[in-house]
Amino acid sequence: MTLIGDLTSSPVIQRYAGNPILTAADIPYPADLIFNAGVAHYQGRYVMVFRNDYNFESTSKHKTNLGLAYSEDGIKWQVQPAPIFALDWPVRGVRRAYDPRLLVLDGRVSMCFALDTDHGVRGGIAFTDDFEHWDIVHLSTPDNRNMVLFPEKINGQYVRLERPFPVYSRGGERFDIWLSTSPDLVHWGNSQLVLAVEDVSFANTKLGPTASPIKTEYGWLTAFHAVDTDPARGKNGWEDAWKKRYTVGLMLLDLENPARVTHLYSQPLMAPEAPYEVDGGFRNNVIFPTGMLLEANGEVRFYYGAADTVMCLATARLDDLLGLLGVG
């Protein structure tokens, strides 16, 4: 394994000065870690579904639920009084749902999520109109997660990015980004490799999708998370050991054939640097974006979990992001 040295964020990225924007202290029910939230524009305001890990008295009691919050400006959030998305499903061995990604698709809010079960990790897709009632339209076979939907059909097909777990063929945690298509959001196939770990100079462990791509005239603007491992990192958080670092990469996918990467930024778009990203968290040195929104003024907002502990916000101009990729 080739070790990765020091990494820095691109100067086009601006972290919100008031970070973090949501923490456990803001939640009106038991909460310890608030992170990896999906964010969307819906019905004239921002909506967030966040992951809440709580009850850390012992590993055996550790639990996860999903919470809901609304905002007028995407910065100050009104957290709803109770968790959502209860796991009372006719699915065998469900343990928890987590890491939501939101997207308004065909006029409804879609949510991709990961589902831990007694028989492996499954990726799911659900729809809602009111955040109380959910239609679960798809659950993958194990092991797959990090699914994100494209905001429109491409060549008559729904499209998603995903991160399967090919443990035997690739070895260890060497996981890549794949793409699959569907005629109806239920049946998925035509799977193709999009981006492999060896394609990314600042990763030595695994890659995964982050949030739904943004359509531009040059291609689908797509962020991804990249992971590198260094045994020397030691404890590095609340856990006994945490040797990984999560950074954010940027690429463009072809508009008509989104399995094809047309442009790849050679450096991280974001690397852990801020105090709330590198110190005092559950898992330090982690930036994990699960929301990416294009605003009317040309600003792109990145909503991300920091140190698997709090929710944060960073921004960049769309033109600057395209400039990093050599277009525009």
Image (cartoon, grey):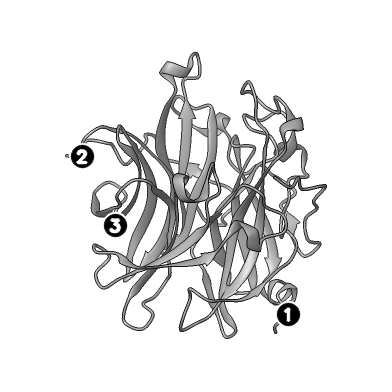
Q: Is residue 165 visible?
A: no
The amino acid type found where label 1 is placed reads Gly
Q: Position of residue 273 (x, y in %)?
A: 78, 45
Q: Position of residue 8 (x, y in %)?
A: 80, 53
C-alpha separation, residue under disc 1 versus residue under disc 3? 36 Å
Q: Nearer the viewer, residue 319 or 48?
A: 319
C-alpha separation, residue under disc 2 versus residue under disc 3? 17 Å
**Which residue is tagged 3?**
127
At a point 32% along the width and 76% down the height, the residue shown is 157
Q: Nearer the viewer, residue 159 or 129?
A: 159
The amino acid type found where label 2 is placed reads Val
- Residue found farthest to the top: 57
C-alpha separation, residue under disc 2 versus residue under disc 1? 46 Å
**Which residue is tagged 2?**
91
Which element is circle 1 on? loop
Which element is circle 3 on? strand
